[in-house]
Image (tube, rainbow, N blue to C red):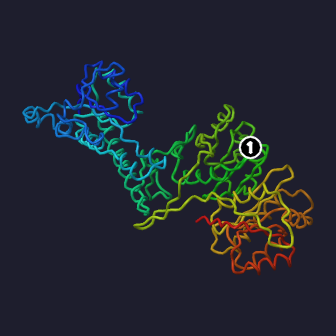
Amino acid sequence: MKNIKINRALISVSDKTEIVELAKVLRGFNCEIISTGGTKKILEEAGIKVTDIREVTGNPEAFGGRMKTISFNIESALLFDREKDKQEAEKLNIKPIDIVVCNLYPFSKVKESGADLDTLIENIDIGGPTMVRAAAKNFKYVTTITDVSDYDAIIKELQENKGCISYNSRFRLMRKAFNHTADYVALISTTMDEQAGERSLRLAFEDGKKLRYGENSHQEGFFYKEIGAGNSLFDIKVLHGKELSYNNIGDIQSAVDSVKNLKRFGCAVIKHNNPCGLAEGDNQRKVFEAAWNGDPISAFGSIIAFNKPVDLNTVEFLNLNNENKRMRKFVEVVIAPKYSEEALEYLQFHKNLRVIEFDPKDSKQKFEIKYLAGSLLLQDCDEKLYEKIEKVTEKQLDCKKELLEFGLIGMMQIKSNSIAIVREMKNGNFQLLGMGAGQPNRLVSTKLAIEKSRENLNNEFEGNPEDFDKYFTEELGKAVLISDAFFPFADNVELAAEAGIRNIIQPGGSIKDKTVKRKCNELGVAMAFTGIRHFKH
């Protein structure tokens, strides 16, 4: 558990970034530096005295550099136990190596460049992983550095500890080294499978932290970061509030995905992974109000996401400092790319409200996975809004293309079977007026979307009660109903038309398409096919 003086170092790196600075500090503590090929040349050009690795191995570098570090002398210098093997090492004339600095051949970059198989093979590092694993195994005595980002911390520790490295640092770097070589080999193996026309999968995550619990209090929950992922959801900044829960994190993902592709000010109100409110417009405060009014009851305890920096006027809609506590709007999380100082200060009125800084545009995924019993489902992310906007009825759609796209974005985030009814408000905002989600029957989803639209329009209606039905029908006549999948029967059209809907968007593709189109023509409803289904289970 003690500090180890670094007397002898082996440096062999592909990425030469800042290696000269580290080597100078090591030499400043009279550390002998052993090096190879290109690394040796860089260090010597910087005026650093270097021992050629051939003086240690007793062998030349050979076969175009394929053989450099692999030798009995090198691996022994890394592996032998400094206490129980000391006498044997002396008899064998093995001098200990105390630190290995090595990053491996850039196989990943070569792969990304589209290199052929022969080039890929030549960029498979053999000697590097061998000495990294040897050094890591013997971490009680040897320090292993595989990441340039660790240089600064090691330099600082060397300077503070007079050329020594602590046990805790060696243990941390050991774990990092084994993860590094594991990921390296995993990438090579999956790439070789690709070359053979097969697909295999190796996933690597780090920094796992335990959450208070999972979806329910009797379940354990953990949160991990994918290795190499930039701007991941794991990296969100919690500016205020209590610890995030398992459910919060899932809802945050749904929230940022709901607004990331909106062009104007966007706001999503998320409950149980579904947008119960969604709006877009030119005034952020009005957009927030429109999103909230999409389902004010469900908005209680919701997750709120904005796609642009938030100002004080916007968040004051929450009424957090109202003396009448019943007037305050309770939400669990607010997410935005940035906050004004005044907005952040205001949000802190609620001591438990989690205030998250994260730009929804950074929410990018390579694929989606679902872990099942001893198996795994993997698919591409659903990112294509539509293939076409094909008129299939006698009547033309009467809506802006921008409203249609807004509706598709919202519908894509709603659990299947999903129906979204969207409209353009008098102030130019787009609003999710009503939605039906997660129903095994599409007709029920349509009923729910219409009922929620009726409820929301009733809340905003200021005329005589007896005139509401006319207002409801007129407003739905200007709205668009969007379905995530085809209508299997004409009953959905009949129900929508009865409520006043005159514009319907759906993927098409049912054997009943002709029947559905015929019903639209009969009822004076415009319908267009997008050619793209958007199931979300």
Is the residue 467 above or below the residue 89 in the image? below
Instruction: Look at 41% across and 27% down and name the residue there.
Output: 18
Tell me where residue 163 appears, x and y as whole percent: 28, 22
Q: Dividing the picture into quarters, in which one does residue 376 lie?
A: bottom left
Q: Dividing the picture into quarters, in which one does residue 143 lie?
A: top left
526 lies left or right of 309: right
Q: Give the residue number, with chain letter if any, for mark 1.
A: 317
Crowding around mark 1 (Cα neighbors within 10 Å: few <14, some 14 to 19, many 20+) is some
Tell me where residue 279 appears, x and y as whole percent: 74, 52
Residue placed most toward the observer, 275 or 466:
275
Amino acid identity at mark 1: Phe
Instruction: Look at 36% across and 44% down and name the residue there.
Output: 180
Instruction: Look at 53% across and 57% down and name the residue there.
Output: 367
Is the residue 524 above or below the residue 465 in the image? below
Q: Secondary structure at mark 1?
A: helix
Residue 402 visible within the image: yes
Q: Dividing the picture into quarters, in which one does residue 455 lie?
A: bottom right
Instruction: Say which quadrant the C terminus sits in.
Output: bottom right
Residue placed most toward the observer, 23 or 499:
23
